[in-house]
Image: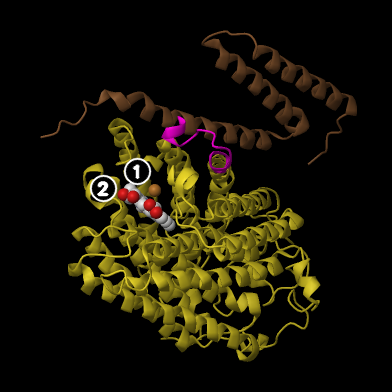
C-alpha cells in the first residue's frame, strides 16, 4: 500500500481544467446544436467526472484492485441504463388492449 | 437432545476482555473496537425491532375483524408504512451484517479490527441520526406511502412526513455503504497468514457478496430518494406525469436497489446457516466452492431481475419477459445452497442445540419463500397475485422465516463468544419451536388469503376472509412470545449464565481460538496462522462432545 505523493500543482491544474469545462458548459448553453445539445452536455460531464475520479480521488495512482472496483461502479450504472431502456423502447410494440 | 458441552478446564471468564476494559458510557460511545460497535448496533436494532413490532401488532389487531373498526384508513396506512420502513431500513438491513458481521469478520480473518475502525463508528452514528429522523417523522404524524414510496403519491399528493422519512432512509443508506466498504477492504487486505480465499469461512464469503450489493446498489436508492424530495419540494417534474415526469421511472430506480437489497437481507443469513449446519453435523460443508460462488452469483444476477416487481405497472411486456426469465435464473444459486446444506446433513452426527433448530427453520421457511417467489416471477400468475396477501406471505417467509431466523440462529450460536456466557438451552429450544410454529400460523394463512384474492394494504376486507385473518393474528401473538423469551434469557445470562469457555460448541474457525469474550485486539498472542481449510470437522472428531 505505497502512498503516491501528488504535487499540489497537479491539483491546481485539474482545478483549472474543471473551471474551463464549467465555463464551456455555460457557453454551450447559448449555442443551439439541436440533437447534439445533450451529447455535448454529457461529454463535458464525463470529462469532469474523469478528472475528479482520476486526480482528486487519486484513482490514477491506485492499485489495479481499486481500478476494478471503480470500473465496477460505472459498469453497474450501465446495467441500470441498459436494462431500463428496453422497457422504454419496446412499450409501443404492443397492440393496445381491445375492449370487449 | 444433547446438553451443551462446557469445557471444564476453561470454566473461567478471562479477567480482561473487550467489554470490561473500560466502563464509562463515553468508552462505549466513542469506541472504535468493532466488537463494542457490534454491541451498540445490537442494542439499537433491537429497539427498532420492538418499535417495528408494535406497528405490526397494530396491523394484525386491525385485521382481526373485517370492518375497519380499530384504526381508520389513514392511520392504518401509516401503521404498515412505518412497520415496513423501520423493519427494512432499521432492522433487517443492518441486522446480521452490522451486528454479527461487525463482531465476527475481524475475528474470522484473524485481524485486530476492521480496516477502518473510525468509519465503522461513524456508520453507527449515521444509523442513529437516520433513526432519530425516522422517529421524528413518526412523532410528527407518520408517513403513509408504503415503504416503497411510490410516486407520484409520495412526491406530489401525500400530506404526511414523506420528506423526513425519505431523508431517514437516505442517511441509513450511507451507514450501510460504509459498513460494506469496511468489510470489503478488511477481507481483501487483512486476512491472517495462510488464510487463502478458499479457506475463508462461508460467513465471510456471504458478507463479501452482501457488501458488493451495498456499495453498488445503495447509491442508486440515495439519488432516487433525492429526486423524490426535489420533486416534492420544488415541483420539478421527474416522476409526476402532470409535471411531465414518468412514475414508472421511479419504480425502475427504486427496484434497481430494492431487489438487490432483498439479497442484502438474506445472504448474511445464509452465511450464518453455513457455519451452524456444519458445526452441528460435525461434517465438512458439502460443496464449499459452490456455496461461495453462489453468493457472488446471487449478488450479481440479483441486479438483473428488478422488473419482476413491475409486471403490471405498464412496463413493456417484452421487458417483463426478460426480467421474468432472469428471475427464474436467480433462484438457481439459492437452490444450490439449500441442496448443499441438506447434503451436509447427510450422515452427519447431528445434534439439536438451539442454533441448529433455527437453522432447520431457516432452510424450510426460506425454501417455501423462494419457491413462492417463482410463482410471482411468472408473469401470468403474478397478474393475479400482485398486490395480494400472497406477496406479503412470500416476502415474510424469506425475510422473517429466512433472515430473522438466521439472525436468531447466529445470535444463539455466537452469544457465548460475544458475552462469555451460556443461556438456558432448554428454554432456548422451546423459544425456537414457538417462533417456528408462530411464524407459520401467522404467514401461511396469508398465502391462502392472497390466492383467494385478498388485496394488501387495506384496513377492511370481505367477511369471508375473516377466519384466516384470525388465525394469522393468533399466530402473531405466539410469534411475539417466541421473540420475547430470548430477550429475557439473554439478559438473564449476562449476569447468571454459566461461563461458556472459549469454544463451547467445539467449533472450527479462528473466532473460537480466542477467549470468550475476546480481548480488545482479539488474539492474546501473535496473529493466528491458518494451516487448514475451513470446517475441517471430521465425524470422528465428534467424540470431543462429551
Ligand atoms: C428466490 C428467488 C426470489 C424470487 C424469484 C422472488 C420473486 C419476487 C417477485 C416476482 C415479487 C413481486 C411480486 C409482486 O409484487 O407482484 C417479489 C416480491 C418481494 N420479494 Fe421476492 N423473490 C425471491 C426471493 C426473495 C428474497 C430472498 C427476499 C428477501 C429476503 C424477497 C423479498 C421480497 C419482497 C420484500 C417483496 C415485496 C416488495 C413489495 O412490493 O413491498 N424475495 N419477489
Ligand atoms: Cu424482487
Q: Where is residue B64 in the image (x, y as percent from the top left)?
A: 30, 74
| Crowd class of label 1 (few under 14; some 14 to 19; many from 20; radius 10 Å) | many
Which stretch is magenta? B229-245
Q: Is B135 situated left or right of B483 in this image?
A: right
Q: Mark 1 near mark 2, Cβ–Cβ under 8 Å?
A: yes
Which mark, by number, is residue A11? none
Question: Residue A85 lies in magenta, yes or no?
Answer: no
- Is ligand 1 closer than 8 angstroms to the Cβ of mark 2? yes
Residue under pointer 1: B308
- Whether residue B538 is visible, yes or no, is no
Q: Position of residue B322 (x, y in %)?
A: 32, 34
- Is ligand 1 closer than 8 angstroms to the Cβ of mark 1? yes
Lower position in the chain sequence, tag 1 or tag 2: 1
Which residue is the extreme one toward the left? A100
Which hue belongs to chain B?
Answer: yellow
Residue drawn 35% across and 72% down?
B62
Residue drawn 89% across and 24% down?
A9
> Disc 2 on helix, strand or loop?
helix
Residue under pointer 2: B382
> Disc 1 on helix, strand or loop?
helix
Amino acid at each position: 500500500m505505497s502512498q503516491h505523493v501528488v504535487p499540489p500543482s497537479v491539483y491546481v491544474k485539474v482545478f483549472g481544467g474543471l473551471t474551463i469545462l464549467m465555463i464551456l458548459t455555460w457557453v454551450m448553453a447559448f449555442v443551439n446544436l439541436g440533437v447534439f445539445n445533450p451529447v455535448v452536455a454529457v461529454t463535458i460531464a464525463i470529462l469532469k467526472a474523469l478528472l475528479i475520479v482520476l486526480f482528486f480521488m487519486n484513482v490514477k495512482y491506485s492499485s489495479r484492485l481499486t481500478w476494478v472496483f471503480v470500473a465496477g461502479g460505472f459498469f453497474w450504472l450501465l446495467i441500470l441504463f441498459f436494462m431500463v431502456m428496453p422497457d422504454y423502447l419496446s412499450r409501443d410494440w404492443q397492440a393496445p388492449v381491445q375492449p370487449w | 437432545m444433547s446438553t451443551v458441552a462446557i469445557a471444564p478446564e476453561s470454566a473461567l471468564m478471562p479477567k480482561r476482555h473487550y467489554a470490561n476494559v473500560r466502563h464509562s458510557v463515553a468508552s462505549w460511545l466513542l469506541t472504535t473496537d468493532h466488537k463494542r460497535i457490534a454491541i451498540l448496533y445490537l442494542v439499537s436494532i433491537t429497539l427498532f425491532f420492538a418499535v417495528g413490532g408494535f406497528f405490526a401488532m397494530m396491523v394484525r389487531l386491525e385485521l382481526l375483524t373485517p370492518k375497519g373498526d380499530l384504526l381508520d384508513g389513514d392511520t392504518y396506512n401509516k401503521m404498515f408504512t412505518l412497520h415496513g420502513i423501520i423493519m427494512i431500513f432499521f432492522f433487517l438491513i443492518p441486522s446480521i451484517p452490522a451486528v454479527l458481521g461487525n463482531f465476527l469478520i475481524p475475528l474470522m480473518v484473524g485481524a485486530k479490527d476492521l480496516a477502518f475502525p473510525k468509519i465503522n463508528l461513524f456508520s453507527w452514528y449515521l444509523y442513529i441520526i437516520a433513526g432519530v429522523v425516522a422517529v421524528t417523522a413518526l412523532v410528527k404524524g407518520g408517513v403513509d406511502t408504503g415503504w416503497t414510496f411510490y410516486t407520484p403519491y409520495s412526491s406530489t399528493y401525500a400530506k404526511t412526513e414523506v420528506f423526513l422519512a425519505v431523508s431517514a432512509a437516505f442517511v441509513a443508506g450511507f451507514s450501510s455503504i460504509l459498513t460494506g466498504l469496511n468489510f470489503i477492504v478488511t477481507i481483501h487486505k487483512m486476512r491472517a497468514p495462510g488464510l487463502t480465499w478458499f479457506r475463508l469461512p462461508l460467513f465471510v464469503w456471504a458478507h463479501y457478496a452482501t457488501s458488493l450489493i451495498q456499495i453498488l446498489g445503495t447509491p442508486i436508492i440515495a439519488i432516487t430518494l433525492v429526486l423524490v424530495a426535489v420533486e416534492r419540494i420544488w415541483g420539478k417534474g421527474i416522476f409526476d406525469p402532470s409535471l411531465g415526469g414518468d412514475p414508472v421511472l421511479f419504480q425502475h430506480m427504486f427496484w434497481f436497489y430494492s431487489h438487490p437489497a432483498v439479497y442484502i437481507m438474506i445472504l448474511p443469513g445464509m452465511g450464518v446457516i453455513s457455519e451452524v449446519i456444519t458445526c452441528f453435523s460435525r461434517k465438512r460443508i458439502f460443496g464449499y466452492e459452490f456455496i461461495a460462488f453462489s453468493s457472488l452469483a446471487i449478488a450479481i444476477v440479483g441486479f438483473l431481475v428488478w422488473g419482476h416487481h413491475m409486471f403490471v405497472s405498464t412496463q413493456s411486456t417484452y421487458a417483463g419477459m426478460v426480467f421474468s426469465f432472469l428471475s427464474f435464473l436467480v433462484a438457481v444459486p439459492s437452490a444450490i445452497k439449500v441442496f448443499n446444506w441438506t447434503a451436509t446433513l447427510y450422515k452427519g452426527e447431528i445434534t439439536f442445540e438451539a442454533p441448529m433448530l433455527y437453522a432447520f427453520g431457516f432452510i424450510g421457511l426460506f425454501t417455501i419463500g423462494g419457491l413462492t417467489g417463482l410463482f410471482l416471477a411468472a408473469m401470468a400468475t403474478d397478474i393475479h397475485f400482485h398486490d395480494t396477501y400472497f406477496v406479503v406471505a412470500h416476502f415474510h417467509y424469506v425475510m422473517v422465516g429466512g433472515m430473522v431466523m438466521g439472525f436468531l440462529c447466529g445470535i444463539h450460536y455466537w452469544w457465548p463468544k460475544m458475552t462469555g456466557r451460556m443461556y438456558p438451552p432448554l428454554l432456548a429450544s422451546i423459544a425456537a419451536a414457538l417462533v417456528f410454529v408462530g411464524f407459520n400460523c401467522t404467514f401461511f394463512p396469508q398465502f391462502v388469503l392472497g390466492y383467494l384474492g385478498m388485496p394488501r394494504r387495506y384496513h377492511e376486507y370481505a367477511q369471508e376472509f375473516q377466519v384466516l385473518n384470525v388465525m394469522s393474528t393468533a399466530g402473531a401473538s405466539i410469534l411475539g412470545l417466541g421473540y420475547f423469551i430470548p430477550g429475557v434469557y439473554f439478559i438473564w445470562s449476562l449476569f447468571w449464565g454459566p461461563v461458556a469457555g472459549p469454544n463451547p460448541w467445539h467449533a472450527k474457525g479462528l473466532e473460537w481460538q480466542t477467549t470468550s469474550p475476546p480481548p480488545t485486539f482479539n488474539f492474546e498472542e501473535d496473529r493466528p496462522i491458518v494451516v487448514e481449510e475451513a470446517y475441517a470437522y471430521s465425524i470422528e472428531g465428534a467424540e470431543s462432545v462429551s
